[in-house]
Amino acid sequence: MVSLHQWQMCPMLAHNVTDLIKSDKDLHAAACVEPVGVAYIACQNTDIKGGDIVAVFGGGPIGLFTAMLSKAVFGASVVHMIEPVPFRRKFSKKWCDYGHPSYSS
């Protein structure tokens, strides 16, 4: 739950990044900022600790970043990805240890 104090701080977090975008590569990197932020907050709110086993439902951008951050930043030992779309499931295998068996390719 967000307190009024936290809500009032949000404008400080917003930045105009248009001056930083000089190329398509910069634009692609900037497009990742919001999904990474959502994934980071999800990991914080679920209180992931080192050695935890994590299940992520959905292998879209936020789900993939959640899987990556669960391991790399928060120390999860195992990350399970539940994803029905074959392309996303295959792509997520780079960061996840296990796909749900009913969706295995």
Image (tube, rainbow, N blue to C red):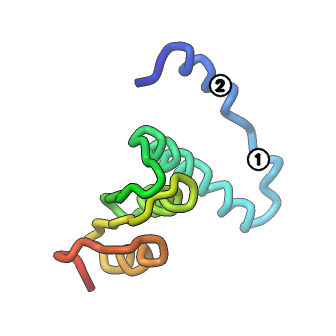
Q: Which residue is mark 2?
A: 11
Rendered image quadrant of residue 46: top left
User: Mark 2 and mark 1: span between their CA atoms?
Assistant: 17 Å
Pinpoint residue 105: horizontal percent, then vertical percent: 27, 85
Residue 53 locus on image (x, y percent):
35, 59
Residue at point 39%, 55% (across, down): 52
81 shown above or below 52:
below
Q: Which residue: 31% across, 79% down?
A: 86
Picture residue at 55% right of the left edge, 20% below the top: 6
Compare residues 92 and 53 and report the one nearer the observer.
Answer: 53
| Image vertical order of residue 11 relative to residue 37, above or below | above
Mark 1 sits on what residue? 18
Residue 81, compared with residue 51, is above or below; it is below
**In terms of secondary structure, where does tag 2 sit?**
helix
Image-based side of 42 in relation to 98, left or right? right
Residue type at the position of mark 1: Thr
> Is 95 positioned to the left or the right of 101 in the image?
right
Q: Which residue is the extreme one toward the top?
A: 4
